[in-house]
Amino acid sequence: MISVVVSFTVGYIFICDSSNSSNIVFDPHLKNTTEMQINLKDFDSWIDRDAKMEEWMNTMNQQSTYLDTSNAIIFEAIRKQYEIDASNCYSDIEYRVREYSSWKDGDSKVTIDSKVNDKNANIACTAPIAPGPLHFSTSSEKCELDLHECSKDDKYSREARIYFTEDTYELPTHCIDMIDLYPEQFKGLNEEYLKKSVSTKHTAYWYERKYSGYMEDTKYEIAFTLRYNNLEDARKGDVKPTSGEWSIRIFTVGDGYSDTWNTYVSNDTLNLYKTLKQTFGENGCN
């Protein structure tokens, strides 16, 4: 058990300590974050979704020194989610589309993101996946340390997300559409490929509840995401989900736009994560 906690702490130091990453030139548009995840289980107990989330939230507030979600901003939405296959454009990067329903907080918005994962922060966080100039002001990016119940799954990721309102979103159908979204990913693509088609795959339906607030000077986001067979089941909240995940994300001081971490808060969050794994998760590798 000690070795697992130590590996998390070392990972934190690697990405948070500027002396250890001084050779990495990060895009100033990137937010610096760490996310801790737990795969949900025992889905019969999630048929009463609100009660189960309340149980988790009560445990978190009791076990953390700094977390108090009584004043958190709560976002609740359902979405259709799918991936765009751009292999015809010579891209093997993951592109994910989320089409939110107008139910509750979704507001019919649409997001597209691209993501690169790697064990090496330098490789992941300098990947050429910045949004195109037309989308820069309506996008966000982050360089993130992803921590999992099994430490061998820990990794770094860079994600670039573009936001659309429903009336401005058009489903990409050809490589030239992908170039508009993420031009650096398709540098040098021959003109003959511009009209090649892209397709969609892996359609799924999700419910999401997110709590956002601050622990002292550290922004946090807590999210429950549950997968259902269709949007109607996701809306109801009294249907057994097919899979799901809990996560907590914390940011560096300044909402992620710095290299400075509040070590008291980050260590407290790591301890909270350990407690939640022991209570609700696997707390290790199978």
Image: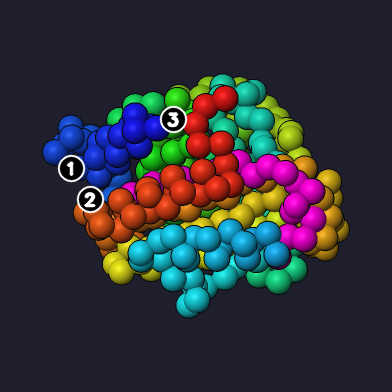
C-alpha gap between disc 3 and disc 2: 24 Å
Q: Earlier in the sequence, mark 3 or mark 2?
A: 3
Range covered by the magenta-colored residues: 31-50
| Residue 259, placed above or below residue 94 | below
Q: Residue at x 77, y 61 (%)?
A: 48
Q: Say which of 248 and 169 sits in front.
A: 248
The reply to whether residue 184 is visible in this rendering is no
Q: Which residue is mark 1?
A: 18
Q: Is residue 255 positioned above or below 5 on the image?
A: below
Q: Are marks 3 and 2 in contact (CB under 8 Å)?
A: no
How crowded pointer 1 is (Cα within 10 Å; few <14, some 14-19, many 20+) is rated as some
Circles 1 and 2: CB atoms closer than 8 Å:
yes
Callout 3: 10 Å neighbours few (<14), some, many (20+)?
some
Residue at which label 3 appears? 151
For the residue pair 258 and 12, the one nearer the viewer reads as 12
Residue 229 x/y as whole percent: 83, 46
Q: Is residue 240 magenta?
A: no
Q: Is residue 139 above or below residue 128?
A: below
Quick one: 87 or 100, which is closer to the camera? 100
Separation of disc 1 and disc 2 at Cα? Answer: 6 Å
Q: Amino acid at mark 1?
A: Ser
Q: Residues within 10 Å of mark 2 (few under 14, many from 20)?
A: some
Q: Is residue 36 magenta?
A: yes
Residue at 56% of width from left, 36% of height from top? 282
Residue 259 bears which disc, if any?
A: 2
What type is the residue that disc 2 sits on? Asp
Asked if 114 appears above or below 259 in the picture, the reply is above
Answer yes or no: is residue 104 visible. yes
Determine the residue positioned at 61% across, 33% down: 175
